[in-house]
Image: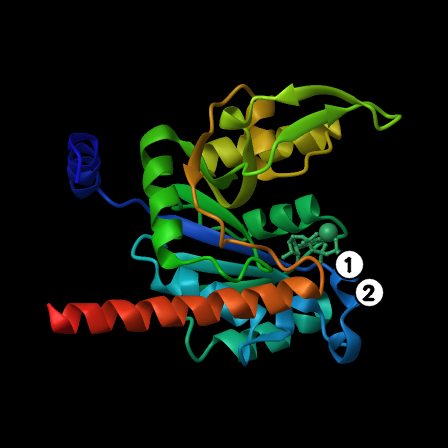
Amino acid sequence: MGFSDILKKARDILTPTKHTTAIILAAGSGERFSADAGELAGIKKQFVPVLGKPVLLRTAEAFEASSLVDDIIIVSGEEEIGLCRELLSPTVSKLKCVVKGGATRQESAMAGLEAVDPKTDFIAIHDGARCLITSEIIDNVIREAYHTGAAAAAERAVDTVKYAANDLTIENTIDRDHVWLMKTPQIFTANLYRAAVYSAFKEGAAVTDDCMLAERLGFKVRVVDCGHENIKLTYAVDRVIAEAILTERKRREAQTIKENKTK
Ligand code: CTP
Ligand code: MG
């Protein structure tokens, strides 16, 4: 452990916990996933099984296991509100409510925001379809947000990144060391997030992630490296990749246990 890691640990221990609500978005229709899902095409992607457990349950259980999350709000399609309650109630004790989403991800986030407890200090927005999230990543991003006001999970670009014009001609190469691919959770102080959401709504601004909402108002958002495994189920093949990653995690865990026993 280096000196900066020790400082970070000390900082985390000294930080008082703040009331934190996770809004998990699961009101999408999963069109790209269903297009190629074969026999699973009839089930929305947030409910398909990944190694036998539904995607949304995996996601919610990671937030349940986080030491810093207090409340969980699920945003789902109107017809799946009952199903979500039934699915999560047995193991997700932090579940505060399941609310009906909107036609776009942004509208669904707003629906979730309206259900947040007024005493909440920090809001974590997460894609329900990002079911490989771990409680460690969630806590890392939350801790960063506690100190800076806004932080988001992201992965460093691994490929060379080019900017191409409309005619698909490459114009230039972007410095990869500064390119981050944004994931979730994305976490903000409740006041910042509320202001950012309502300002974008009022001005009809289209955004593709929640960081853009904060950036529009000039707030600084920190990226937190979440590695390569925090994938979102977008296409049907992502389910196969997710199962392979989970199998590999199990193998790694078993190996660590074995190594610790022989020490
Ligand atoms: N989402 C939502 N409400 C919407 C659209 C999306 O809550 N109106 C959620 C999805 O359920 C998903 C997350 O936002 O967990 C990320 O969106 P995406 O991966 O695009 O999912 P879908 O919109 O469902 O998929 P597609 O775009 O392929 O239809
Ligand atoms: Mg979508």
Q: How crowded is mark 2: few (under 14 residues within 10 Å), some or many (20 or more)?
A: few
Q: Position of residue 68 (x, y in %)?
A: 32, 52
- Whether the residue carrying mark 1 lies under 8 Å from ligand 1 is answered with yes
Question: In the shown orientation, is residue 63 left or right of residue 209?
Answer: left
Identified at 71% across, 70% down, the residue is 44
The residue indicated by pointer 2 is 35
Q: What element carries label 1?
A: helix
Tally the marks: 2
Q: Label 2 to label 1, Cα distance in Å? A: 5 Å
The residue indicated by pointer 1 is 32
Q: Where is residue 148 in the image (x, y as percent from the top left)?
A: 36, 29
User: Residue 243 or 57: which is nearer the viewer?
Assistant: 243
Q: Which residue lies furthest to the left in this view?
A: 263
Identified at 52% across, 35% down, the residue is 193
Q: Is residue 95 visible?
A: yes
Q: Is residue 189 visible?
A: no
Vertical position of residue 187 compared to residue 147: above or below: below
Amino acid of disc 1: Arg
Q: Where is residue 6 in the image (x, y as percent from the top left)?
A: 15, 36
Question: In the shown orientation, is residue 105 left or right of residue 125?
Answer: right
State which quarter of the image contains the C terminus.
bottom left
Amino acid of disc 2: Ala
User: Residue 237 or 115: which is nearer the viewer?
Assistant: 237
User: Residue 230 or 176: which is nearer the viewer?
Assistant: 176
Vertical position of residue 36 compared to residue 32: above or below: below
User: Residue 246 or 63: which is nearer the viewer?
Assistant: 246
Question: In the shown orientation, is residue 126 left or right of residue 204?
Answer: left
Residue contact at pointers 2 and 1, CB within 8 angstroms: yes
Q: Position of residue 14 (x, y in %)?
A: 16, 39
The quadrant in which residue 261 appears is bottom left
Q: How crowded is mark 1: few (under 14 residues within 10 Å), some or many (20 or more)?
A: few
State which quarter of the image contains the N terminus.
top left
